[in-house]
Structure formats: structure tokens, C-alpha cells
Amino acid sequence: MSRLVVISNRVPVPTPGVPPAGGLAVALSGAMEARGGLWFGWSGAKLPPGESEPSEPKITTADGVTYAVIDLSERDLDEYYAGFSNRMLWPLFHYRMELTEFTRISLSGYHRVNRLFAQRLAPMLKPDDVIWVHDYHLIPMAAELRAMGFRNRMGFFLHIPFPPPDVLTALPNHADVVRSLAAYDVVGFQTPSDVENFETYVRRERVGRRLPDGRFVAHGRAVTVEAFPVGIETDAFAAVAAASNRNALVRRVRDSLGDRKLIIGVDRLDYSKGIAQRIQAYETFLLLDPEWRGRCVYLQITPKSREEVPEYAAMEREVAELAGRVNGAYSELDWTPLRYVNRTVGRNALAGLYRQAAVGVVTPLRDGMNLVAKEYVAAQDPENPGALLLSRFAGAAAELDGALMTNPYDVDGTAGALARALDMSVEERRERWSAMFERIRDYDVTWWRETFLEALERDDEAPPSTGRM
Ligand code: GDG
């Protein structure tokens, strides 16, 4: 079996005794440990001012996996990471054109860092390595490697949405982005509607077409473009949640609730997650359904994220202000309606808190997939599962049709759906939950990884017209 080489912006180099956290790190660590492999990317550290990047990456080996990481300079991080990746591609791909900032400087930094990654990785590559690149930071990676003469199988997975052409074409270099995608053998998106957006773009901009075998020909290359919805480690997560009675933090939260119902939200502090609209919906719910005052608690766990990007600092203030307003208006001396927490919680405790919660609220304005929705479902008690309130704009909505769907822009509608979720009978909750659980067990993270790698390793380079035997 050929070696797997994963390239991602950040690399979760393992620390002894600390398991990898986060869906992606866990998913990919499993694949790497099963096959042995190389994982290359940014260390997460900044080079001291004035120092240039050494030509050799720092190497660590653990459990048959080689981690190779490089530090980046302040300028590289400003332009490539905080700039083009997170102030242009992230908002645009989440349909937020008004939040984008395009500059030639950040675009050239983006390309410079992609080239630097390719140059540092190149000496470590073998001709039969299978290369799997992750996410919007590294779209030009295959094109860079191909320009250096590499002919390996190369795949790309986009964790965020692929927007429709009317949005994508607001990116001044949209044509280059799509040309860069065509340098891969397989491009994976989260949902069929992302694939549809890609197909519409290719047709409208006349850069390619679909082949009879389902692949696309674009910019002269045949590329498999399919949806591979990312999953979680469903069984393992369910087991952790079922054993969470023993977790001291989970017990403390349960004791603090008494017989009040828990509503839970878990999101990085990011404008794509719809946290402000969600708090407004909760405020409306408290206004319109006074019988729930004092009988429920909404816990919103929101670790801070990308604080170096100005739009994030602005939304942090907005959300904090809203949270304060709701608590100011509705708190009693012995009841606080909203617990707003800007801190991370351990993974085991998180699983237990999901299980405690009568309602999981996952209401992003736009999301590639959203793993929290799947984790909430996995963590439920099958006898008495909670209800999931899910935005129709999360990729997960394409799979979890047992959820109560909501439009997060409709604050009143979301408030009503929250009341309905809290009132739902146990029979209805069980029925909805079973369908969702079955789905996430069949399409878990192992399915995602193996299906993607199978597509990548399929030797379909020859055009179908040659009629291979
Ligand atoms: C991108 C796409 C796509 C959050 N707070 C805590 C914590 N988390 C964990 C969650 C979950 C993960 O972080 C977040 O994953 P999401 O999928 O919700 O969102 P993004 O970070 O935006 O991820 C997304 C994903 O990539 C994978 O392809 O689904 O659409 O945007 O696992 O549990 N974990 C712990 N404590 C916290 O406080 N332990």
C-alpha cells in the first residue's frame, strides 16, 4: 500500500498522554496510524522577528506517523492566514461578501506560503505517495507540486461550503482558484449542493464539462468531484457520553440545573455560526413563552477563535452585549437564563453535557458540515433522547432529516421551533433520533476517510474513451 501524505494548515503533533481533539485531527490520526504516513503543515508557532524559515522541517515520529512542521513568519501569517485565507476565502465561501477584504498583497502571501510548503515538503516525497490536501488555506498545493514535476495522485477536501458562481465570481482570482482545483485527481466537497455549485460554475464560465463517467474535465484535466460528508467517531463518542455520569464537571452542571431543562450550543466564536441570531431567538422565546422562564437554562460554550482578524473582535463584542442584555432583562435572583462561556471544555465533559441537554441548538448561517450536530445526536440516551434544532444552512441538514429544521435568519421562527423542541413528546424524539443515529453510524468518520481514499487511489487516469480492459 502506498504511503499517505496529509497536508493541512495546522498539524496536531501529539503530546504524550493527550489524545487528539477535534473531529478532523481524530479522523486523520486514525488513517495515518493505520497506514503509517507523513503529516505536513504549519507548527502553529511564529518565527522570531528577523529570522527566516530554516530549509528543514521539524520532524517528530509517534505511532508510525511522521509529523513534519514548519514555523511561519509574522508577515506570512498576516498575509496568508489572517489575510487571504480568513478575510477573503472564509467569508466569501460562507456567502458573506460584505465581510471580505481582497488585497494583492495578501493574495501574493497566500501563494508564497503555498510555494514554501511545496518546497519544504518536496524532498520528503516519494513517487508513489498518495497526497491528501485539506481545506481552503492550501488550494494551490497540487498546482505548486505539479509545477515542480510531481505526478502523484493528489486529492483535496474542502471542509467549508463551495459557494454558487454568483458569489464565487466576486473573488477577483476565481478563475485561478478553479484552475488550481483542476490540478487534483479528486476534489471532495461536504454536500451534493457544493458539487452542484461547482458544476454550475464550470458550465457558466465555460471552463469544462462533465464526462459520461461522472468526472469533470476542466482546464484539460479529468477530475473526480464528489460529495464526501465528513462524519464523527459515532460509536466511540456515544460510549464516552454514556459513561459521562462519572465526570465531575458533568455532575456539577446537572446538580446546578435541578429539574430545569438544558439547552446547549457549542461553537467556535465565528460569525458563520449564527450565535447572535440564536441568542436573539432565545430572547424572543423567553418573551413569548413566559411559562418557560425559570424552567430552562441555555448553555452556550463558545471558545474564542481567530482573534487576530478584526471582524471576529467586533462580533465578540456584539455577542457579549446581547448575552448581557438577555440576562439583564430576564434573570431572577436565583435563575440565570443564559450561561455564556468563552472557554473550551474537555471532550468527555462535552459529550456528557450534550447528553444532559434536552435540546441541541445548531443554527449556523452557513456551515460546510457542522460536527456539533452529529456529536449531539451521538451523545443522546436512546431511551430519552433530546431534540436537535438544526439550521437548514448547515451541511449536516442534508443528512439529519430527523432534526427540527430552522431558518436562522427567521428569529421568530427559531424561537417557535425552540418551544416546539422543548415540548416534543418522547415518542417523537425517539423516532427522529433513531433515523439520525442510524445515518451517522453508517456514515461515520471511517466511512468518510476510506471512501475518499478509495476514490483517490482508483487508477482512473486513462480517459474512459480508451476502453481499458
Ligand atoms: C470546519 C467546518 C466542518 C468546539 N468547542 C469545543 C470543542 N469543539 C469542537 C466540537 C467539534 C469541533 O470543535 C467544531 O467542528 P464544527 O464542524 O462544528 O466546526 P468548524 O470548526 O467550523 O469546522 C465545518 C468541519 O470543519 C469538519 O469538516 O464540519 O463545517 O467549518 O468537534 O466538538 N471541543 C471541545 N471543547 C470545546 O469547548 N472539547
Image (tube, rainbow, N blue to C red):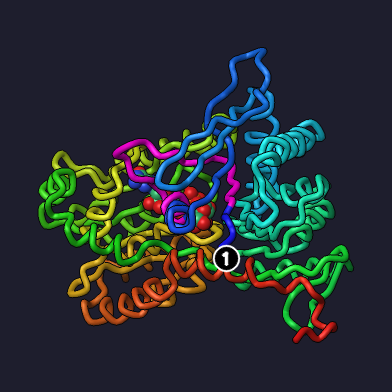
Residue that mark 1 sits on: 453
Q: Residue at point 73% right, 59% down?
A: 184
- In the displayed structure, 115 sits above or below 451; it is above
Q: Is residue 460 left or right of residue 205?
A: left
Nearest the camera: 4 or 449? Answer: 4
Look at the numbered disc 1 and say if its residue's Cβ is closer than 8 Å to ligand 1: no
Give, as a single range, the part of the protein colored magenta: 5-27
Residue reaching furthest top?
A: 50
Q: Is residue 41 left or right of residue 324?
A: right
Q: Is residue 105 left or right of residue 44?
A: right
Nearest the camera: 166 or 36? Answer: 36
Q: Is residue 183 visible to the viewer in this orientation of the structure? A: yes
Image x and y of residue 46, in percent: 57, 24
Q: Name the quadrant of the N terminus.
A: bottom right
- In the displayed structure, 361 sits above or below 41; it is below
Near mark 1 (Cα within 10 A), the count class, few <14, some 14-19 or many ≥20, is some
Nearest the camera: 126 or 445? Answer: 126
Image x and y of residue 391, in percent: 47, 64
**Residue 440 belongs to the span the image colors magenta:** no
Where residue 39 sits, quadrant-wise, is top right
Please, what is the three-letter code of the amino acid marked with disc 1? Leu
Image x and y of residue 418, in percent: 34, 64
Q: Is residue 277 visible to the viewer in this orientation of the structure? A: no
**Residue 6 belongs to the span the image colors magenta:** yes
Q: Residue at point 31% right, 79% down?
A: 434
